[in-house]
Image: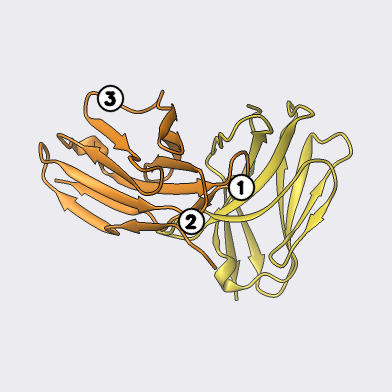
Chain colours: A orange, B yellow
Amino acid sequence: EAEVAQSPRYKITEKSQAVAFWCDPISGHATLYWYRQILGQGPELLVQFQDESVVDDSQLPKDRFSAERLKGVDSTLKIQPAELGDSAMYLCASSPVRDTQYFGPGTRLTVL
Amino acid sequence: DAKTTQPTSMDCAEGRAANLPCNHSTISGNEYVYWYRQIHSQGPQYIIHGLKNNETNEMASLIITEDRKSSTLILPHATLRDTAVYYCIVRNVGTDKLIFGTGTRLQVFP
């Protein structure tokens, strides 16, 4: 069964450093999402791509976060500089258009 | 998007049916009910979804009331591996957006 791949699974960094997360969606899924999940809460959408275009980044803190999906396949989420409050699980999901989302295993970020 | 209300936590004995309720009283006609679960430190796992009719798959059954204001996810024979947080989400047909609440923490005990 096809799965969403994410790397790294765990990342520890110091505040003010840059970090990057990678996501490879299920083959053929046009829509890709990045979520952030703070401990004890449900995931919150950060950014949504349709192919290579951003369709919703209203909750993305654009002063420090950026996301790209250059060829409309895999995607990178970057934080620069990282802050203590960025410690969370970062989840990637993909779906066919207007269909069920499937999530990857996530990247757990700890900022020291 | 409609809000959902779920109990914070539930317990279930292994081998028994787990019935997880969800209220979505403001749901509109073009909104699906989705269920996901999240086992500790993993990504959310899709379970099942429905619009009006009851649905069943290899993981669970979804019972939606006739007025669509509430639903119940049924795990027919819970196992220890079903211990997880279960999220009930209402998704508009016209958008892809999922809005997660805090879910129900289901603890299955031996």
Residue B50: where, in percent of width, then height?
Answer: 76, 46
Left or right of B74: which side holds B47?
left
Q: Is residue B16 visible?
A: yes
Q: What type is the residue that disc 2 sits on?
A: Ile
Within the image, what quadrant is residue A4 found in?
A: bottom left
Please determine whether, in this image, residue B57 is positioned above or below residue A65. below
Provide the secondary structure element on which disc 3 rests: loop
**Extreme residue toward the front, this view:** A71
Residue A46: where, in percent of width, then height?
Answer: 39, 33
* Sequence-wise first label, 2 or 1: 2
Q: Could you give the CA–CA distance between mark 3 and mark 1, rounded to whole angstroms?
A: 27 Å
Closer to viewer: mark 2 or mark 1:
2
Q: Is residue B5 visible?
A: no
The residue sitting at 43% across, 56% down in the picture is A104
Can you say which quadrant of the picture contains the N terminus of chain A? bottom right
Provide the secondary structure element on which disc 1 rests: loop
Chain assignment, label 2: A
The residue sitting at 10% across, 41% down in the picture is A17
Closer to viewer: mark 2 or mark 3:
2
Mark 1 highlights which residue? A100
Mark 3 highlights which residue? A62
